[in-house]
Image (cartoon, rainbow, N blue to C red):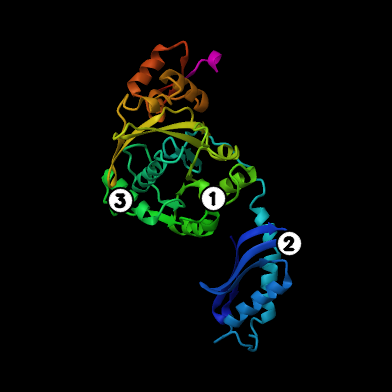
Amino acid sequence: MLLKRRHLPELHVTLRFRASQIRMERTGVHARIEVLAAETVLAWSNFNVERDEDRVRLANSAYSHLLPNGNGSKQQDLAVYPRTHLKSDIDQFCIGLWDARQDDLLPRAVAGTLERQEPRYLLRPYVLEGGGTIIFAPPGRGKSYILMLMGVALDAGLEQFWPVRACRVLLINLERSLPSVADRLGNINEVLGLERGRRIFVQHARGRSLSDVAVAAERFIASEGIECVLVDSVSRAGLGDLNNNTAVNQIIDTLNHLCPSWVALAHTPRSDESHLYGGIHFEAGADVVVQLASEQEEGGPLGVGLQITKNNDVGKQPVWVGALEFDASGLRVARRARPGEFGEVERMRKLSMKEAIKEHLLDVGARDATQIAEELGFNRSNVSHLLATDTGLFQPAGRLGHRQLYGVRAQFK
């Protein structure tokens, strides 16, 4: 959004010219242009800013409302600010729009950080600060429940399941009816120990596409200080065939533009549950991609496993396994699964503790036992024992205060 101001002390008013939705189309530069006096919109239009006749119409409409008791009828111009001056201000504002838009994209010198930095999470290890996450699974496997559990945990700052940094969230609901979302939210609040009626922000848009609601969502995100957006699901993005790379790139661009941190649900092809449905740029555009697997015996709890299949900066992670229990009214219990409770889900774990630690240290550098245990979800005593005894693979890598750091020996890198 770009702004320009014109102060008119004789009229005790400051005019503002505001541009948004600036884009290059086949016929030229288009934008939404608003002319405001204080917070009152005098006139606005979404048009080709290179067409003089459109700028004339906007200037005349705005000027008619600027005049004292203006009602749109012809009146004599104000001596201190004639109609031609307003037209000139709009012309000058519009002629510089595209160059000003490009200035935001100019390269700049960026300094490296002076100290090593750990990844910063909103919800460890699945949601990075300033990162995008895609969770994929076939329909009916519990994706929406996990998404809402994450959302409520973030919004309320609850850490029963994952370490979180509390922040305001927005759920963009493109899949379910509003009563269904409200029922699920009430049940999730209850199982997390919150009041059933606790609220989170929801943009209800069932039957619409992400492209339909993006502008309204962007405005709400900016005004309410939303730090993480949850989308159910990208299958309803409405930007074209999900196997088309251009459409997929547009979806990722839309999500990145909405909010620096986002979590979106996706589906799998019918024939293969090991990867998400759509173009390869879904995986390329997300910072973290999570496969969700589930297991359930008739009448028993639903076991849900989360396995990171692609990451930027996160490193190898163990499978997280939870249990969701239902009755006739929906979800009634959410808990961490007991060891061995869901064997098929647990077999998603492709790495032993030793292998996971090795891969993690190769990804993120030296760590102490406490950091490794927290980041990978292992028992600290077991991690410490492994680092101290497996000297063929691990070696001391200096100290940070009183903490002993470990790395991987060079021959295994």
Q: Residue at x 30, y 28 (%)?
A: 338
Q: Residues within 10 Å of mark 1 (few under 14, many from 20)?
A: many
Q: Which residues are magenta?
A: 406-413
Question: Of residues 241 and 164, which is closer to you in this image?
Answer: 241
Q: Residues within 10 Å of mark 2 (few under 14, many from 20)?
A: few
Q: Amino acid at mark 2?
A: Thr
Pointers 1 and 2 in contact (CB under 8 A)?
no
Question: Could you tell me if residue 281 is visible in this image?
Answer: yes
Magenta-drawn stretch contains 408 = yes
Mark 1 element type = loop
Q: Identify the mark at residue 237; answer none if there is no mark.
A: 1
Question: Could you tell me if residue 88 is visible in this image?
Answer: no
Q: Amino acid at mark 1?
A: Ala
Q: Which residue is mark 3?
A: 186
Report, in whole angstroms, how far the alpha carbon at label 3 lies from the one at label 2: 50 Å
The x and y percentages for residue 64 are: 61, 82
The x and y percentages for residue 173 are: 44, 52
Q: Quadrant of the C terminus?
A: top right
Pointers 3 and 2 in contact (CB under 8 A)?
no
Q: Which residue is mark 2?
A: 27
Q: Residue at x 54, y 15 (%)?
A: 410
Mark 2 element type = loop
Q: Amino acid at mark 3?
A: Gly
Report, in whole angstroms, how far the alpha carbon at label 1 lies from the one at label 2: 26 Å
Q: Quadrant of residue 17?
A: bottom right
Seen in the image, is 306 located left or right of residue 85? Answer: left
Q: Quadrant of the N terminus?
A: bottom right
Q: Identify the mark at residue 183; answer none if there is no mark.
A: none
